Amino acid sequence: MRRALILAALLAGALPAAAQVADLRSKTEFRVCADPAAVPMSSEDGQGFENRIAQLFAEKLGVPVAYTWFPQGPGFIRKTLRAGLCDVVIGYAQGDEMVQNTNHYYTSAYGIVTRKDSPLAAVQVLEDPALRDHPIGVVAGTPPATNLARAGLAKNMRGWDLFVDRRTEDPVGDMLAQVKSGELAAAVIWGPLAGPLVKQDPELQFTPLLGETSGPRMFYRITMGVRLGEQEWKRQLNSLIRRHQDEIDAILRDAGVPLLDDYGKALKE
């Protein structure tokens, strides 16, 4: 009897919380949590490819887009999505426990950026001996940093911080500029960050790392993130993703995002 009373009390306490979560979502705006300077993904001027996807979804829902801007890094989800200030993060890696993931809407990979005229332009794996004795840019704490170290290239690595305020710092832009100038022989960068920027520079190329045989995987499935417990909202977004996948792909391809099949084995046709 006592256990039943305790369970009833717990359920009674849980139901209002669930109702509050459901009530947080706006029905009159498509409220997006985003970094104001995460170029080329999101930007306050609306030019990022995630901005374009947000606009597509807002149009399909028949409501305007409204943004809550906050630099991505520690506290981003807590101070935006979980605070109820916005309802969706447009790009979020599958499996993160901070949010509830929708179905993934694209898969991409880390890759190596070189000059097109570089002797390293043919490199496709980080174990390639050609990389030895060359300075290589990488963001510290990312999977390719581990693979570079495992390949015996730790002394070659030139590291940038993982979490920065991109309104004042531009690690990807800095790496690409140094590759172009020759200060770095190559840089290993997340495809959705590097691909669109490389697309704009005829001297650079991006090669996705599809052939790594050990270490952390180089590809990730990207979802949208919503609050835990918002099942109806997640199902609605999943439906939009399913029905408008071709339009999403067109936005990503136009931006220059390298798209992979679901298994990270080949470029998506």
Image (cartoon, rainbow, N blue to C red):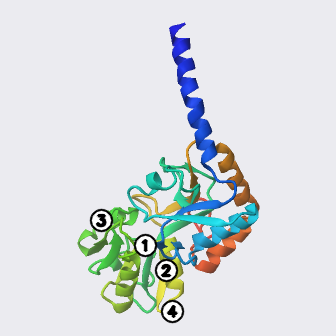
The correct choice, above or below, for 5 with respect to 231 in the image is above
Q: Mark 4: which amino acid?
A: Pro
Q: Secondary structure at mark 3?
A: helix
User: Is disc 4 surrounded by few (<14), some (14 to 19) or many (20+) residues within 10 Å?
Assistant: few
Residue 206 badge: 2
**Residues at marks 1 and 2 touching, judged by CB atoms closer than 8 Å:** yes
160 to the left or right of 123: left
Q: CA distance from mark 4 to mark 1?
A: 18 Å
Q: State how far apart marks 4 and 2 are (Cα).
A: 11 Å
Identity of the residue furthest to the top in this view: 1
Q: Please identify the quadrant where the N terminus is shown.
A: top right
Label 1 sits on a secondary structure element that is: strand
Looking at marks 1 and 2 on the same chain, the residue that comes earlier in the sequence is marked by 1
Q: Residue at 68% of width from left, 55% of height from top? A: 237
Callout 4: helix, strand or loop? loop
Displayed quadrant of residue 132: bottom left
**Residue beneath disc 4:** 202
The secondary structure type at the circle numbered 2 is strand
Q: Which one is closest to the eye, mark 2 or mark 3? A: 2
Asked if labels 3 and 2 touch by Cβ distance under 8 angstroms, the answer is no
Specify whether residue 218 is in view: yes
Name the residue beneath numbered marker 1: 189
Read off the residue under disc 3: 149
- Work out whether 119 lies above or below 138: below
Quadrant in which the C terminus is drawn: bottom right
Cα distance, mark 3 to mark 1? 15 Å
Residue 209 visible here: no
Q: CA distance from mark 4 to mark 3?
A: 30 Å
Task: First in sequence, mark 2 or 3: give its number.
Answer: 3
